[in-house]
Each structure stands twice: as structure tokens, then as C-alpha cells.
Amino acid sequence: MSITAQLRDSVGLPGGGALVHGFALDSRGGGACRVLLGDGRELAVHDLDELFAGERAPSAVFPLPWPGWDRGVHSVSPDGTFAVFSGQRAVRAVGRGGETLWEYRHACWGPAIGHPHTGDEQEVCPGNEHGSCRVSEDGRFVWAHVVVEPADDEWEERWVVLDARDGRELARLPLDSAASGSHQLSHPDGVHMGLCIGMGQDGVLLHWARQDGGELTGWDLNEGMDRILMDVHEGHPGFLTVEHSGWNLQVHALDGTVLAEMSPESADDEDPPRWDYGCGFVDAGTVIASTTDSAEEPEQARHWLLDARTLEIRGAVAYPRGPVDGYVRPLGDGTWLTWDDKSGTLNRWAATTL
């Protein structure tokens, strides 16, 4: 079955590919989608609807604390009054005027244990490893994935909860990980936070936690070390994951229970397609996912709509001007984004009938 996509909006946007491929799109339950675009010197915050309407002026601009550091996953408070940056040796909160509000120091993400530092705050050590941070839905807390000073030459990472007012550590959860990178998703229920840690060839770790007073209650889905946290939705009680190699999608309850699972449809059992990392909730009842192209059959690269409860495949998406490959980024409001790297165009779509 083919489901026709309708083009809702289109805009030429330098750097717009980051909205589909990276972590530049910041959406929160019940609020507008915000775009976080960095140019190496500052982080500009835009409203997605305003960008599509032609408004290029950002609603806020935050200077990057460490211009040479181009990794880490950062976060902006729900009210847009401050940003929190995940650095190589610190988590730092910055106000809209560019002032440092607080800083939480931690060990260096550089993988060489015990390597020296010059004392220059702008020094960037070798290595691509990084953490992430996320401001809670109510703006009161900052959840940060950090590395701590090693004990007995053992690498140690933690998930910490900080007071958003002053950066004080309120709770911590030790992690048995050696991250290449991480990202976090706050559940729209305002209570739970998810942390996904990529460890390269060593697999993926997925943790959920909630703060109970001064303690963190955490649980994980790490038996197979292969689930990537992809999306949450305010109208859905759980979350969506994809298997690391793309063999299946799963919908989970918040405790990790698998509610539904789906592998991509295959027309050739000898060369089955796989899901790629572009998937999520179009709305509370619909998931969109894409299959990767095959070396033998590149036409297998396409986008699919699935039932969000059962993951039953409803059909492939047919675009009016021909196939659109690459990742998709659903917005949760019934629409999704694609990026045309040839024209530098960001497009927003909706299905004619879901």
C-alpha cells in the first residue's frame, strides 16, 4: 500500500541537515519545536514554524563557552532563558546575555587517562568522546552524562542531576559505560529521563531514571546492549527504539516491557532491508521509519508509516516528485521533516490520510 505525502512547508536553510541527521531539533511536550543551530561560535535558537514562515532572526543567541569544542549534546531551558552546554571538562549554564550562570566541573572526556592539561580553559584534548545534558521539562533540573576522575586507573562515568539554578549536584547514578557519545530524551510526563550511550563496536546502553527526592531510581534495557532510544510522544505512554543493526523496531512501556516489534518488509529474503536511525512518532498513533538502501537494490530505501501501538506497517510513503531517501525527522504533530542536501532545502510533510 502506498500513502501519499503532501508538502506542507519548504525552506532553504544552511545547516538544516542537522535538524534531520543530528540533535539540533529540540521538541518538548505541548510546546513548539525549536531549532538549535551552532556555527562554532554561538548557538542560535529559532522557532521552527517561524523559520518556515521566513523569519531568520533567532529568538535567542548563546555564545559557546568553548569555541574549539564541537561535540557534546547541549540543551536550552523550556522558557529559553538559559542554555546548558556539555563540554569536554565541564557542564556550563549560560544566560541569554552570555553570562556564565554556573559550571559543574568533571574529568576530561579525552580517552587517554591521566593526560596533562595546560590550564587553558579553551584547550581541547584529542578524542571524539563526549557526554550530553538535558534540562528537565519544568526547567528545574539539568541531567548530565559526565566522566569523573578515575579511581585506580578505571574509567568511570555518571549520570548526575544538577540544580538548574546553581549547578549543585542533587543526585547521581554510576554507569558501567565507556561512551563514544550520548543523547538524552525527557519524557513528556515531566518525571522520567532517558539516556542512550553509544560505545562504538562495544554496543549501546539505554537507561531510564526518575528522581525520587535526593535519589535516582534507574533501570536499563542493556541485556543485549543493542537498543537505541529514538523517540517519545506526549500521547504515548512509552518510547520507541531501533535495534543497533536495524533488524527491528520496538515500542516499549516505560519499564522497558516490549509492547510491539516489527522488522522491515522484504521482497528478497537473500538481501533483507534494515531500519536505519531515522524513525519516531509522527503523532500519538503513527510511527514513521526508513529502510536503508541495499548495495544490490537501492530502491529499497524508502519511508514507511506504521501503527504506533502494534508497529504494523500501514504502507510506504509516496512523495509527489519521486522518491525521497535519507533520514526522516517526525515532529509529533502529524508532520515530518526531510532534508534535500543537493538543494539545501528543508521540507515538512504530512500524509494525506493517516
Image (spheres, rainbow, N blue to C red):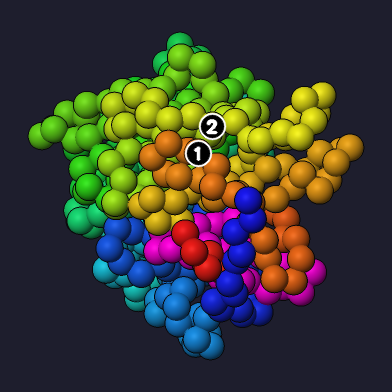
Identify the element where label 1 is drawn: loop
Q: Position of residue 12 (x, y in %)?
A: 66, 79
Front one among 212 and 262: 262
Name the residue beneath numbered marker 1.
312
Going by the picture, which residue comes out furthest to the top? 152
Q: Residue at x 22, y 29 (%)?
A: 216
Q: Is residue 94 left or right of residue 304?
A: left
Can residue 177 be seen by looking at this rendering?
A: yes
Q: CA distance from mark 2 to mark 1?
A: 7 Å
350 in relation to 10, above or below: above
Going by the picture, which residue comes out furthest to the bottom? 54
Query: Pointer 2 and pointer 1: residues touching (CB < 8 Å)?
Result: yes
In the picture, residue 332 is in which quadrant? bottom left
In the picture, residue 256 is in which quadrant? top left
Q: Nearer the viewer, mark 2 or mark 1?
A: 1
Total marks shown come to 2
Q: Amino acid at mark 2?
A: Met
Q: Residue at x 42, y 44 (%)?
A: 308
